[in-house]
Structure formats: structure tokens, C-alpha cells
Image: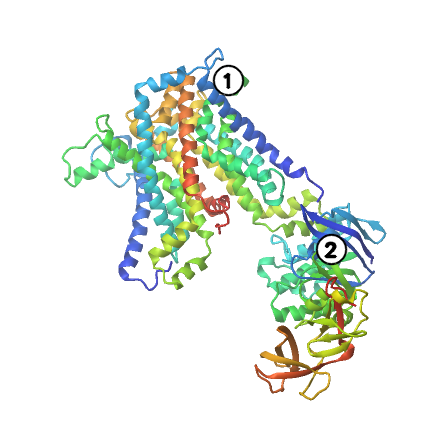
Amino acid sequence: MNVDGTSSAMRWTFRVSILVLCAWVLVPIYLLITNTLSSPEEVVSFPKKVWPSFNLESISFFINFAGVGQALWNSVLVACVTMVFSISAGAPAGYALSRFDFRGKSFYRVLILMTRAFPLPLLALPLAVLYIRIGLDDTILGLALLHTMLALPFAVLITYSLFSGIPVELEEAAWTLGCNRFQAFYKVIFPLVLPGLTASAIFAFVISWNEVFGAAVLTIEHRTLPAFLLQGLDQAPLHLKFAGGAVLVAPALLFIFLVRKYLFSMWGIANR
Amino acid sequence: MQTRALPYLLLLPSVILLGVLFLYPFVLVAWQAISDDAGQLTSAHFSEMLGHWKFNTAFKNTLYLTLAVVPIQMVLALYMASLVTGMKRGRDAFLYIWTIPLGISDLAAGIIWLSIFEQSGFLNSFLVTFGINEQPETFLGYQNKGTIFLAIALAEIWRATAIVLVILVAGMGLIPKEYQEAAEVFGASRWQRFTKVTLPLLKPSLQTALILRVILAFEVFAVVAALGGTNLPILMGEVYQWQFVLRDPNVAAAFALVILGISILCTLVIMWFLRTPKGATI
Amino acid sequence: MAEIKIKSVARRFGKVEALKSIDLTVADQEFLVLLGASGCGKTTLLRIVAGLETASEGEVWIGDERVDRLPPRDRKIAMVFQNYAVFPHLTVFENIAFGLRMAKLDQNTVDKRVKRTAELMHIDPLLERYSGQLSGGQRQRVAVARALAMEPEVLLMDEPLSNLDALLRMEMRAELKSVLAESKTTTIYVTHDQVEAMSMADRIAIMNKGEIVQASDAVDIYRNPSHRFVGSFIGNPPMNFLPAKPLEGSMWSVANLQLPGPAHPSNATDSQIEFAIRPEDLTVGDATTEGAMHVKVRVVEPLGSHLLASCLVDEQLFRVVLDSDHPITSGDSLYIKPMMDRIRWFDAKSEHVL
């Protein structure tokens, strides 16, 4: 669809729409940041100013609040374990899907796609029961396993599209030049997919970092940041909530920026 | 090469994870919902769930929220996607801005919109400063169910339109430009090209997006917790309540089965409704 | 330096027979071209020799060693791929050195060999570049250099020139031929381009539907097709075919002509054979010329060096190559006389030459 040759009214609607939609996305985030960078008194004062006073009291209050440090650390730990698990299980599967034709391939693909038709956070309920039985209740590992389940379908799909984007001929060339399968992968394929692999790891990190329900159900002592915030929603003062929200949002913004290129290729291949 | 077992070996870790963490737990949760502590089949948990005064409200609220949010998201995302394809410069920048909410958790989104709707929040400040209202309103108070609903719907639309956008933009990227050009040569207007060429070819993506969004809408939880507390019961919130506050995992499991049931039902309906004839794909 | 022996190699994909029991020997230092339309099985055969695909049955020998159970790396082969497969994350130097490093040669030898092959392929100024900074033709040269640097016993090439534009392809064709002649490596070269095949090959093996129909040198294949398919595939335009009816003795009636042909088979009544001749093996006469075939001109295509006239005889297409100056337009009548020693006869059923 080309904008050329259309009326100037159309062109203006086009431009205004784009700007309005940008504002729609950005303004709420800006308001959260304004709140976060205001003192606790300003947060509850009325009427509110639209400019932040760049007062760091709210944020330092949040950071020093009992349990926040631990929750932050737990969040990072769970997200990192999720990242490792989902990539080390997902990438081989993605590779197999892109390179081999084998019996049961379409069944496996359906299984992976099917996971998206299930409300996955609900898995937390049976897992809670299961974990008590095997002693994984209220542990980082237990929660990370749930988050792995959330991230795995995406890891498989992203790596599937990554490996599919690399011509088989490159691997075959390596074989004819003296490599075995592992050497060919390590010397030729791996360097080429590394950026994409990093992106899908980051994606897994974000999924875990943001997950609330499962974390709230599966942990008691070892709360992650979202679970910690959820628990405090009733009693916590406003400025604590806002600072917490901002801390939750900040890394996610950066990460989405890093993986933006791969978001689209993933969904492109998922629908083939 | 002589490696027939290799693909299975590569799939093994993920298959084990899927089996242990996906298939088995779903069996477990179903069993939990229909059995008592002695291991006998029972419908007691379902009766307790259905008999609870909040069930109907939670069910209706979840359904209404889905109906209010998902259609708007689909239309909005379609509009955004077609804006993006019409862009010559700055495509990547705008696409990044519009996909930012993708990285934001539902809890954070709830908190963000809380800063707008709370009593001393930005909306009240705006209304009073410009003399539209004299007093700040308690938008999120228990007596204002309507505005709570509206705030939650807005927060959900704000947060989760991005995933639809991503799926649709990816889908549009797969449609060769020639189809558009061919339609144009044969005299189709811009609107006709959109409805007669783009939309039908986009069906697989629309299907994926719709299924994903509807299921996520049934799972809505933290946004509601942040904005409505317990003033606006929804299904997922009830699961949490029964599991944690009322400490009855069986009823929680019954609720979970209800969510699961409507999710699968909707998936099937959408798949049937947006099916593509065999061979009619790009 | 090795001979390649392919012994009754077959390949099935499910029920589809991609290769039906191929037997082929490529002599030491020979340049053999596998020629055929897409889907005829030529690439599958090459990949079986390379070890990238497994034969359903049969044996492959390189030199004195049976290799069909070995992985590609142990077959002493090198391969040039259709899309070049130049590693994008390595420089041209490292691409050429890749196989040498895998073979754990010392740095000195690696340097020397890379330099030599790069000079041979005229890419020595590009050694520090990456594949993304190269043109298609340059990538092609890197791929060939990478294969030659291995000093393989057997060189396999899968349509290496098909992604180049026409002019470059002609240039590379001549260059490759001279480089490979010098390297004296046994080569199997797959292509669908018959001009390429004829210009480069010591011997051409023509494949159709998973079988080798004829394997011989270019002139023989052109002049003496052993099979109807070869005549209809080789040559631009290809051979003309007309049905022949049996007459007395070993005479046959073709259009309005009576021609001496092969002896009648025993059951003469239902025997069907075809008369075949190349469009350029005809001389033009007039209505009075004895033994001339009368054809109606439908379309005339001036092609510069000659005219190509598509004519009709008994509702059958019949092509004639004429001198560029020949005054002729569509609708004209033409009287043409086949050169007797260039006529070929094919069995209509078995399609073999008689």
C-alpha cells in the first residue's frame, strides 16, 4: 500500500494515526516513570504534576524495603535457569525440525503448537501438588521448570526458524571438507545462529521475569519480584507499587529492543 | 547421513519436559478436580464451585472482558499492521514503539494504569485541573464496577495488542506484494484489496492471533488484581483465591478445568471458523 | 587420481524410484557430465557419490575403496555446491583453508595451498573479504578454490554455474575447463544446460527418469542418439520425428516420401517405427526436386545466424533450419530433402534406435 497518489487528507490521517498510537503506548509508561521519580509525598498529593521532580526517595525506599532485594535476586535466578533450560531443550528440537524428515514430526509440531491453546499458568496448580511430593515446593528450580514450560514452545519455534534460515548446503559443504556432524555444527552453524540464539534466550528470560500467577502459587518464601508485588498489592503504599512496577518494566524494555528483529521471524514460521 | 535416531535424540529433552511438565500435570489437575482425598470420584468440588456466589459473577466478568477486549485488539492490530506496511521510513522505529508493551508483564501493566485511575492519579488530576470535575472520583472503588471494568479493559488493550500486531505483521510479511499489485491492476480499490486479498491470505495469522489472545484473555489475572483487587472477580483470580486464601486445591482445580474447557472450546471454534481450504495457502 | 565405479545404485523415496539401478564408471582423470532435466535424478546420484545421501541399494567405489558406507569426510572427495555454500562467517582465506585445517595441515602448507589455488582462480586480492562483500561470480570462484585446495581424488560439482548470468557463465565455463584439465582430477559435473555439458565434458551421461539413457562424447550423443529421448532432448531445436509406415522390402513411407530403412521386423503389420532427422540436416529444393518432402511453413523465427522455420507435415510439427537469407514467410510451401546419412530410425515402442 503506497501513500503516493492519495489525497492529502488521507496522508494526514495516516500521520496522525501513527502519532496517536505512539502516544497511546508511550504516555502511560511515561506517567509511571513520573510517579517513580517523585517523592512519596508527591505521589499521593493532588492534583498531580506531569513533570517528575527527579526525587529518588520512592525508588530508594523500594530498594531498601524488606524482601525486595531477595525477590529481585530470585527473579534473576529463576529467569536465568529458565533461559538455560528452555534453550538447551528447545534448540536441539528446533534443529531437528529444520533439518530432518522423520516419523512423528508433524505430531511433535502439533504438540508444540497445542501448548499455546492451553492456559499454561494453570499448570502451577498440579505442579504445586507434584512439587510437595518430590520436595521441589517453594524452590527456584521448581518455578524455573514451570517457566521453562512457558518458554519452551517459543524457544523451539524461534530456533526452528533460525536453523531453517541457514542453508543445509553450508553444513554439507563442511561435511565434504572433513567435518563430522558435530564439528560442522560447531564450526559453521553455531557461529551463524549465535545472535538469534541469544535473542531467544533473552525472550525466555523476559517470559520468566514477567510471570506472576505461577510464581505466586508455587513460591512462599522464595518469592520473585512479580509475586512479591502481587502479594503486597493490598497493603503496600502507592509509591512502593509504582517503583516496583518501574523496576519490573525497565529490563523488559531493553530486552524487547534487543530481540525485536526475531519476534517477527518466529511468528512467520509458526503459521506455515 | 546414517543417523536415523538423531532427530529423536534431539527431540528427547523437550519431549520429556513436555510430558512431565505439560501432559502429566493436566491429567493431575483434572483428577484433582473430580476426586476426593480418598481417591473416589466425586462431583462435590464442582458443586461447591457452582454453588459459590462468586462463580457466576467471575464467569460472566471473564467472558465480558474477553468480548470487550479481543475484538478491539484485533481491529486495532490490523489497523496498526496496515499502517506499518504503508510506511516508507521509520518502519522499524514505530514497530519497536508499538511492540514495547509485549515486554511488560500484566502486573506492571496493571500498576501503570493504576497510576492513571487511582484516586490521586493522573486522570483525576486532569479532570479537576481543567475544571471538568470539582472533586476527584474514586474510579476504582467497589461502588464503581463500571469504571473498574473500563480501566481493566483499557489496560488489557494497551498491554496485549502488541502480540497480535507482531503475529499479523509477520503474517503480512509472508504475503507476496504481487497479489496486491495484481488486485490493483484488476481495479480493486484500497479497501477492496484489504478485504479481498490481504484478509483472506492473512487467515492463518488471524487464527493464531485470535486463539492466543482469547486464551490469554481467559487467563487474565494480575491486571485485575492490580486495578480491581477483589472488587471484580474473574476466573483466574478465583483459582488463586481458592488455592491460597481458602486453601481448597480441589475447588481451585475445578475452576482450572472450567478455564481449560472454555479455552479448548474457543480454540476449536476459532479453528473451524477461520479454517483455510487445503491448498489455498500461500 | 581415482576411478569412480557406481554399481547398480538405486534410490527410492517411499514408492518413488528416484534412481533405478545405475551403473557407471568414470575413468581416472575423466571429466564426466551428468546431464538431464530437473527431477531426473542427476543431483541425487551426485549426492550419493558424495555421501550426502544414502543409496537404497548398490555400491560406490572410489579407487580401490568401497565408500558407500563412509561419511563424506572419509571419501577423499571435494564438492562445489549450486549455491556455492561459501561460509558467511569466514573470510575468503579461511573458507579456502577450511578443509585443510580440518585435515590438520601445518600453517605453512595451508598458506601455500590457499595462495596457489586463490591465484589459480584469480581471487588472490579478495582473501580478506567476507562472502557478503563478493559478487556471485567471485563466490563461485571461492567455492571452486576451496574444493581444489583439498587436492581431492574426486571433484563433484552440482550445477556450479547455474546461478550466474549468461555472459559470466560462458566465461567461467571456459576457465573452469582449463583449470580442471590442468588439475587432472576425476570430475563429475551435474548440469541441466546441454551447451555447458557439451563444451566441457570428456563424456556426457544423459539421465531421464532415474536412468542413464546414453553415455558418450558430445558429438556421438548429438549425431547418434541411442534413444528417442536423447534426440528430443539434445540440440536446439531438437530432432524431428515422423511416423513411418512399412512398404515393400525394407522401404518405409514417411510423409510423401519413400525411404530405405531398417529391415521389417517379423510381425510387420503392427510394427511401428519413427523417422528422425535434425533440422539442420535438410537441403532445400523446389517442387521438382526428387525425393523432397513437402512441408507447410507456419512460423518463421529469424535467429541471426539462421532462420528457424516451424512447419507442418501431416499435422505434425517439423522444424527446419534455413540460411538467414532464405526468402520465406509463414504460409509458404517448402520442399526439403533429408541428407540420407543423417537419417535415424527409432522403435516407437521401446524408443531405442534401430
Q: Few, some or many C-alpha atoms within 10 Å of disc 1 (few <14, some 14-19, many ≥20)?
A: few
Chain to which the residue tagged by mark 1 belongs: A
Residue C263 at what x, y percent from top left? 82, 71
For image coordinates 46% across by 30% down, the residue present is A120
* Closest to the observer, A50 or B198: B198
Q: Is residue C164 above or below residue A150?
A: below
In this picture, residue C48 sits left or right of residue A200: right
Report, in whole angstroms, how far the alpha carbon at label 2 lies from the one at label 1.
59 Å
Q: Is residue C238 above or below residue A224?
A: below
Which element is circle 1 on? helix
For image coordinates 58% across by 60% down, the residue present is C133
For image coordinates 83% across by 57% down, the residue present is C3
Residue A209 at what x, y percent from top left? 45, 33
Same chain? Circles 2 and 1: no
Residue A153 at what x, y percent from top left? 51, 36
Identify the image quadrant of the C terminus of chain C. Answer: bottom right
Identify the image quadrant of the N terminus of chain C. Answer: bottom right
Hey, which quadrant is residue B259 in on the image?
Answer: top left
- Image mark count: 2
Q: Few, some or many C-alpha atoms within 10 Å of disc 2 (few <14, some 14-19, many ≥20)?
A: many
Amino acid type of disc 1?
Answer: Ile
- Marking on residue A132: 1
* Closest to the observer, B189 or A9: B189
Residue C21 at what x, y percent from top left? 76, 52
- Marking on residue C78: 2
Chain to which the residue tagged by mark 2 belongs: C
On the question of residue A253 being in view, the answer is: no
- Marking on residue C59: none
